[in-house]
Image (cartoon, coloured by chain):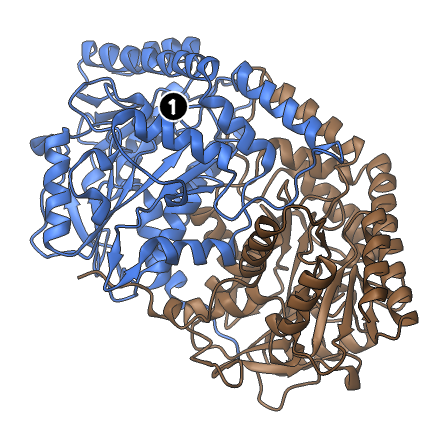
Chain colours: A brown, B blue
Amino acid sequence: MVTVNENFKRLPGSYLFSTIGKKVREYKAANPDKKVISLGIGDVTLPLCKTVTDALHKATDEMGNAETFHGYAPDLGYEFLRHAIRDKDYAKRGVDIALDEIFISDGAKSDSGNIQDIFGLNNRVAVCDPVYPVYVDSNAMAGRAGYFNKEEGKWTDLIYMPCLAENGFAPQLPEETPDIIYLCFPNNPTGTTIKKSELQKWVDYANENHAVIIYDAAYEAYISEEDVAHSIYECEGAKKCAIELRSFSKNAGFTGTRLGFTVIPKELVVDGTSVNGLWARRQGSKFNGTAYIIQRAGEAVYSKEGQQETKEQIAYYMRNAKIIRDSLADAGFTVYGGVNAPYIWLSVPNGLTSWEFFDKLLTEADIVGTPGSGFGPSGEGYFRLTAFGKYEDTLEAVERFKRLK
Amino acid sequence: MVTVNENFKRLPGSYLFSTIGKKVREYKAANPDKKVISLGIGDVTLPLCKTVTDALHKATDEMGNAETFHGYAPDLGYEFLRHAIRDKDYAKRGVDIALDEIFISDGAKSDSGNIQDIFGLNNRVAVCDPVYPVYVDSNAMAGRAGYFNKEEGKWTDLIYMPCLAENGFAPQLPEETPDIIYLCFPNNPTGTTIKKSELQKWVDYANENHAVIIYDAAYEAYISEEDVAHSIYECEGAKKCAIELRSFSKNAGFTGTRLGFTVIPKELVVDGTSVNGLWARRQGSKFNGTAYIIQRAGEAVYSKEGQQETKEQIAYYMRNAKIIRDSLADAGFTVYGGVNAPYIWLSVPNGLTSWEFFDKLLTEADIVGTPGSGFGPSGEGYFRLTAFGKYEDTLEAVERFKRLK
């Protein structure tokens, strides 16, 4: 008799953003006259820039012509895109990454969910708290997380690294030694980051303890300060212990276009086994590449014009971040983040829980945000706002916020 | 100390088509003057049809405009595409599938590799032999396959269902009772299929034994005979036991464009748990949808013009199939398949092994095929040729074949 994966049954409720989506749909259906502004899910609103749509058109024409048609893509992705990544994301910053250390994918969510596939089930996993839910859920599905303790809001077998206001939302080295450490800087959801010298400590810690760091750098394009690393490989020794995940979603508006990549240096060897080779095998067997036209769109992001146009998009969103941050601070809210990341992390006022504040904000101000507790128990009492809205909507949202208080 | 997934270390060699790709690249590099014709990997050669490229252009323009831009797609995929699938693939054939039983993905390879995620590790898995390697490799990576016995070419814990000339390449009900049964009709690699009445026996068997059938219907568009089911749900009771995988790769030339879908009826309940809900959770947590523009391209396939244009492509490939089948039979080869599928399955002559014939064909006739043994031990002595080449190349290839003998 067939059985299901029992680990799935232990998952509490649905995926966070699915739950929020459902709540918002129901509210809109019941209040069709209300103008709901979303500062909730981290989804971009600016259209694809011209250089990118030009590349899509051109590649589409190629796909419509027998002479220039492309079937299955190479396993790792097209060299033209991996070349651009190697040169512009790494070599430019003094980091030497080889072409066959870069794996093109359909986005960082898939990669961050699937990467645990290549590791043993007995590894102890450490996550920041609050945390992007995919790291937790994918390990829970595989059975590495144990059981979910509803009262604590924690999985029994995960190591939680609380990131709170008192430590500047930076995780501290955990008491128990983990085998796999998920880090995300600039951080989703707190919108904060750590200095390169702090990141170096994590790299040293991982190397000393034979741990692997899964480093999610999806928001690196938003870094504005000098002493923050854009890639973990800027730290010495990181190639021996770190996997880096990157995305085109936030730096070029590809949330609905789907493109990302994972870097696994060949120096990363676990007990004699090349982790790069394991991922190559995993992707070769369970993935079939990203559309040619979308890889061409990704290449266009690295062109001179593409860089200029996407920089303008990032500046647009970061202007929103500053508006939210400054206006809410002026209005008496306690706010964090929004300097090196498109997220603002807000202390929920008046002793409300995160979900109570979610409901209040939705019903009293028609604003969608994300409850901090959805990201882990240490997110309780906090609330995430994103800077990905339209400028005018962001202005209106902060006005509504001021009236709310 | 971190550990890797030990199951990966048990995998013999690399993914079949990666191995072939490497051999061919090396041969071409050493023989730059030779015109190598590939009848190997099942990759299409005709360009995307006009209706599809028109849809891509239109959707790209939408993505370049703030008013019509699309960010993250809905979890299950856009309704416009699921509507088209429900109506044209199912309702038209008298099969009632609900919109929320359809999950859009980036292709059937991802889905057929990932679907095992939602089942327990203790399930006994049955596969046809020969078989599309993804079913085997993905279960081996999860630990359901046991150990690979090199001498037998088999995994210790899988149930193999030999498909040989003497049984018309149809699997027989296995002696041991499996929990999960992978079936693919029209079949890759043998190019053969079974009648609907035979498929009904499998559905009845699965329901009697509380087993799940994972039904890969990637080649359904190539069915030319009346008594062959296009969907397993044409069989009575299939909604209680079967998951169906579909692809746009072969019916619309999307190998380099990436689109597929999986159907999981809500009636499919395992020990009180909705399998549909498990997959929704898996995809919601570890996947982030397919590009908007590509979902629009998929919708265009279902338009009147799209249906006409893709039917012409299929007719083109099936003409190739007939040429290969008839010419090789005339030349004294024993051939199977090619009537309801774009694959021809060839008995390797002169007592050569499949890989010996691969090398002979490559070096003496500059033709790439796929060794049958790459698909499982019962594939030894057979060889797969695909009809996806260009017409002129196919003609030239069969001439070279005739000279080879």
Residue displayed at 77% across by 42% down = A46
Looking at the rendered structure, the number of numbered marks drawn on it comes to 1
Chain of the residue that carries numbered disc 1 in the rendered image: B
**Left of B11 or right of it: where is A332?**
right
| A65 to B167, vertically: above or below | above
Mark 1: few/some/many CA within 10 Å (<14, 14-19, 20+): many
- Can you tell which quarter of the image residue A369 is in? bottom right
| A335 to B265, vertically: above or below | below
Q: Position of residue A371 (x, y in %)?
A: 65, 69
Q: Quadrant of the C terminus of chain B?
A: top left
Residue displayed at 58% across by 17% down = A64
**Left of B181 or right of it: where is B317?**
right
**Left of A61 or right of it: where is A318?**
right
Label 1: element kind? loop
Any part of residue B135 in sight: yes
Label 1 sits on residue: B39
- Can you tell which quarter of the image residue B157 is in? bottom left
Q: Amino acid at mark 1?
A: Leu
Q: Position of residue A13 (x, y in %)?
A: 47, 67
Q: Nearer the viewer, residue B332 or A17?
A: A17
Q: Position of residue A43 (x, y in %)?
A: 69, 51
Q: Nearer the viewer, residue B316 or A129?
A: A129
Q: Position of residue A206 (x, y in %)?
A: 65, 78
Any part of residue A226 in sight: no
Residue displayed at 53% across by 60% down = A113
| B30 to A218, vertically: above or below | above
